[in-house]
């Protein structure tokens, strides 16, 4: 029997009431390493008509279609009922032809279990507001939300919304505001005990304002920030701006209209989207000198927070249909990733966004990825390292960021995870 105001079969329309634990403090951002979580994958048989969305195109045809992901998940721990076989993806290992379908609870619960085992605090759940307002896609994004919320309760992790404004030319501020109203009124996100708060305010990461390739105007940006911070019913949010790294100088991929300078400084905290902006030590050091150090100096004076992005590497050759290796930013067996955390620690940064937990489309995933990939297909691997290598690194980096382990410029010889 559905509760009053709840539609049967829509678990996101009621507060979570199942098993819960509170291992991670949900009252502060301080000392947290939080992963972006996409959860946007579909497969045939998941109750939608979207096919292999985000995995590839035309994959339901034997030896037809193409993959649009650059990494192959290690599926050995998933329930076989949560896997779907891909015709033509041949490999000798069990389930090597299978990929994960995300609409069932199993994958999200397993991912949150991994977060607990490897000492990862939780997630910013990526929610594209255009999809959330779509009659055809909204059920998917809402079901994934319910799954992640339950996983965070069961494993003592924290979650918060990352509202992605990549909505195309039809974008309106009303679409964004209505979705947050839905999350407040129906999902009751702000009241959830595992929903992340900071300074006694619910945390929201508003991603995508000010980028050249997105249509938002400064006036729309100011309207949105004012809504989330000051609306008498839906405001009072601790609002983080996911914006271009060169926001201070209106350079890089930021729009150059001077009005954006005011909008950027209206946030409570800044989260520069650093993924893909450097590819080696020299370019990383360049960003440190020209972006991170200057950001910290200005934001300290403004009383604003800072949450830079760490990413393990990059590749989207299959998605962009480029020659293998053309777009790759090498992982260097984790040293590229670790060096970012070491710099952040040296700069006194306390909170880091990891982009991303499950993003195999752009080759930035840190979850368990296989070195055994379908024959005749191109995929980036973990270079022979264990499938949980980047989970181990993220947990160890979290301890370093919190001061529970000393600053180390190189990956420590012994990593403390996993733990049961």
Image: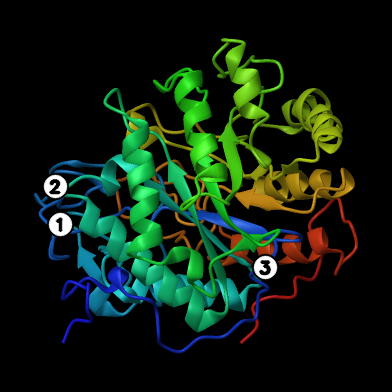
Q: Residues within 10 Å of mark 1 (few under 14, many from 20)?
A: some
Image side of residue 350 versus residue 95, left or right: right
Distance of label 1 from label 3 (alpha carbons): 46 Å
Dot 2 surroundings within 10 Å: few (below 14), some, or many (20 or more)? few
Along the horizontal axis of the image, is 298 left or right of 396? right
Question: Residue 87 bears which disc, if any?
Answer: 1
255 up-or-down from 397: above or below: above
Q: Are marks 1 and 2 in contact (CB under 8 Å)?
A: yes
Dot 2 corresponds to which residue? Answer: 63
- Above or below 67: residue 103: below
**Along the polypeptide, which appears first: circle 1 or circle 3?**
3
Q: CA gap, disc 1 to disc 2?
A: 7 Å
Real-space Cα separation, disc 3 to disc 2, in angstroms: 50 Å
* Quarter of the C terminus within the rendering: bottom right
Image quadrant occupied by the N terminus: bottom left
Which residue was labeled with disc 3?
27
Viewer-closest of 415 and 27: 27
Q: Is residue 150 visible?
A: yes
Q: Residue 85 location, x and y as percent?
A: 19, 64
């Amino acid at each position: 029997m559905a509760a009053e105001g709840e539609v049967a079969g829509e678990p996101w329309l009621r507060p979570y009431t199942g098993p819960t634990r509170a291992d991670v403090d949900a009252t502060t951002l301080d000392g947290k390493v939080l992963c972006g979580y996409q959860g946007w994958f579909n497969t045939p048989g998941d109750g939608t008509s979207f096919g292999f969305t985000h995995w590839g195109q035309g994959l339901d045809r034997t030896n037809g279609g193409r993959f649009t992901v650059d990494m192959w998940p290690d599926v050995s721990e998933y329930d076989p009922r949560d896997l779907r076989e891909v015709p033509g993806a041949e490999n000798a290992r069990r389930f090597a032809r299978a990929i994960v379908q995300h609409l069932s609870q199993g994958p999200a619960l397993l991912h949150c279990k991994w977060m607990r085992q490897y000492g990862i605090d939780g997630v910013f759940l990526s929610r594209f507001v255009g999809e959330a307002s779509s009659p055809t896609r909204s059920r998917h994004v809402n079901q994934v939300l319910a799954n992640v919320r339950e996983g965070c309760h069961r494993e003592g992790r924290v979650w918060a919304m990352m509202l992605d404004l990549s909505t195309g030319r039809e974008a309106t501020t009303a679409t964004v505001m209505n979705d947050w109203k839905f999350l407040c009124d129906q999902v009751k996100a702000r009241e959830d005990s595992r929903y992340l708060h900071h300074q006694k305010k619910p945390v929201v990461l508003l991603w995508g304002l000010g980028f050249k390739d997105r249509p938002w105007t400064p006036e729309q940006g100011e309207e949105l920030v004012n809504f989330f911070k000051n609306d008498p019913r839906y405001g009072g949010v601790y609002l983080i701006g996911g914006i271009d790294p060169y926001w201070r100088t209106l350079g890089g991929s930021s729009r150059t209209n001077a009005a954006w300078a005011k909008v950027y400084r209206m946030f409570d905290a800044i989260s520069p989207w650093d993924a893909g902006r450097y590819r080696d030590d020299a370019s990383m050091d360049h960003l440190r000198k020209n972006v991170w150090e200057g950001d910290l100096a200005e934001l300290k004076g403004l009383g604003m927070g800072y949450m830079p992005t760490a990413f393990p590497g990059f590749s989207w050759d299959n998605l962009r249909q480029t020659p293998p290796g053309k777009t790759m930013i090498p992982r260097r067996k984790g040293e590229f990733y670790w060096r970012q955390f070491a710099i952040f620690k040296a700069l006194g940064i306390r909170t880091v966004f990891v982009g991303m937990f499950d993003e195999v489309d752009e080759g930035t995933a840190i979850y368990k990825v296989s070195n055994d990939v379908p024959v005749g297909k191109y995929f980036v691997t973990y270079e022979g390292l264990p499938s949980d290598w980047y989970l181990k690194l993220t947990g160890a980096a979290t301890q370093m960021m919190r001061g529970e382990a000393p600053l180390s410029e190189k990956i420590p010889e012994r990593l403390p995870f996993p733990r049961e």
